[in-house]
Image (cartoon, rainbow, N blue to C red):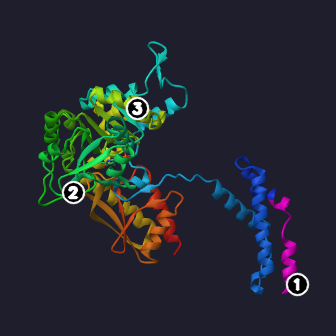
Amino acid sequence: MEQLRRARLREIPPVNELSQHSRLRELQQNIAPARITECVQVMLNELRRQILAAKDIDELAHPLQIDALADAVYAQLSAGFAFRLQRVVNATGIVLHTNCGRSVLPAEALQRIVAIAGGYANLELNLATGERGSRYWHVEELLCRLTGAEAAMVVNNNAAAVLLVMHALAAGQEVIVSRGELVEVGGAFRIPEVLKAGGAKLVEVGTTNKTRPSDFATAVTDNTALLLKVHTSNYRVVGFTQMVSATELVEVSKATGIPVVEDLGSGTLIDLKCWGLPEEPTVQAEIAAGMDLVTFSGDKLLGGPQAGIIVGKQEFIAKLKADQLTRALRIDKLTLTALEATLRLYLTGSLQSIPTLQMLAVREEELNAAAEQLACELRNVVGKAADIAVIPEFSQVGGGSLPTADIPTFAVSIAPRVGTVNKLEDFLRSATTPILARIQHDKLLLDVRTLLPGDATIIAQVCSAWAEGY
Ligand SMILES: *Cc1c(COP(=O)(O)O)cnc(C)c1O
């Protein structure tokens, strides 16, 4: 045993020798030589410790192989060097999957990002005069034309938009909100907390299920700054309910002289009913109803980049632009470029170029055909390892939008005959391009609604590798 131990110890290569191994020299383009040497050193020290600690003759039976050691160092270093942010295949059917980055950007937006961010741009430059310009100018007119508002501005996200409105228009004053609309959106964004962070004092009126216009009117004091309506985008109160509509709240606003603001959450510019989705108020409808300001997200139903869009009356937008917080919440050029490109698609009626809308609008026959095709490809590669079927299912919009909407879809179900469904799920999620699916009744479901071109091929390759493992 001790003889073996000494033999193994003698086989440990010098640090320099292993560091210069041809396999590791490939890495020198991306990784500093000192980092490679350090990793080799750590690895060899660990190896020496293991040899010295070995209690069983089996542990020392195999001679060390320098190629295998180089491979191990290579794997460790390249894993450390790999991108953390990765492309994934979203087979969950959740269109606005917040954990997967919500909206898939239109190709037009990507092209514009490359064109604009790869060089200098007139981000804050008025080319007509040569003087300093406003970054909001690039999208303000577009937003006004699309929503019918007088003025517009954009910030980092909708949470920032609400925060800014509170800070600029209601700091140190009262904001009246219905108890039925004090929502928490994902990531612990709570309306009451945002109001507080903006320096406003929340005045709750009505009850969870019923609030009347008169509740708002009687709560107005000398210190009231705003009436706030929050679109309850991630839940519904059903049964014995009464909500104050936008029109009713605007009437209270006119009667009391207190401005009225709506946090619309998802904020769609098109009527989703034509695709069989539940009714969702459009931004233009809320502006037409007389809202002074409306805030909404850029990456929810709009289908653009993460952004917070604020549209409404000129006098209030001017106050927001002048607020100190605006600088901290300001939108960057990548986002602005993508937003401009996305909004222009609405203006030209090119809705088929907006992936989020496409995924919501796709017809059932097309989904069925795509599911049948994927099922066929998968049957070919997995053989007897699993039973594959196409089943009718429901997709979700996600991102806290249209919570009660179950949109009919088709999914490919995989019932493994070998291993467990959890192991299959794990295998897909750990693939080079991770695949996200859901488990239901011991089957893995792949909803084709959210698959992008090329995804089916990736799924087939990974499933093939899974089946080969058995
Ligand atoms: C989603 C949502 C927000 C937060 O929007 P982000 O763009 O994610 O910051 C705020 N309010 C409502 C009602 C929402 O639905």
State which region is magenta.
1-18
Real-space Cα distance between discs 1 and 2? 75 Å
Determine whether the residue tagged by mark 1 lies in a helix, strand or loop.
helix
Percent of width and height locating residue 369: 30, 56
**Residue displayed at 68% across by 61% down:** 76
Q: Which residue is mark 1?
A: 3
The amino acid sitting under disc 3 is Asp
Name the residue type under label 1: Gln
The crowding category of the residue bearing disc 1, from other C-alpha atoms within 10 Å (few below 14, some 14 to 19, many at least 20), is few
Left or right of 160, for residue 218: left
Residue 74 placement: quadrant: bottom right
Q: Is residue 208 visible?
A: yes
Residue at numbered disc 3: 323
Name the spot of residue 380 as percent of width and height, x first. 42, 65
Mark 1 / mark 2, whichever is N-terminal? 1
Which residue, given by chain and number where applicable, does mark 2 sit on?
A: 236
Mark 3 vs 2, N-terminal side: 2
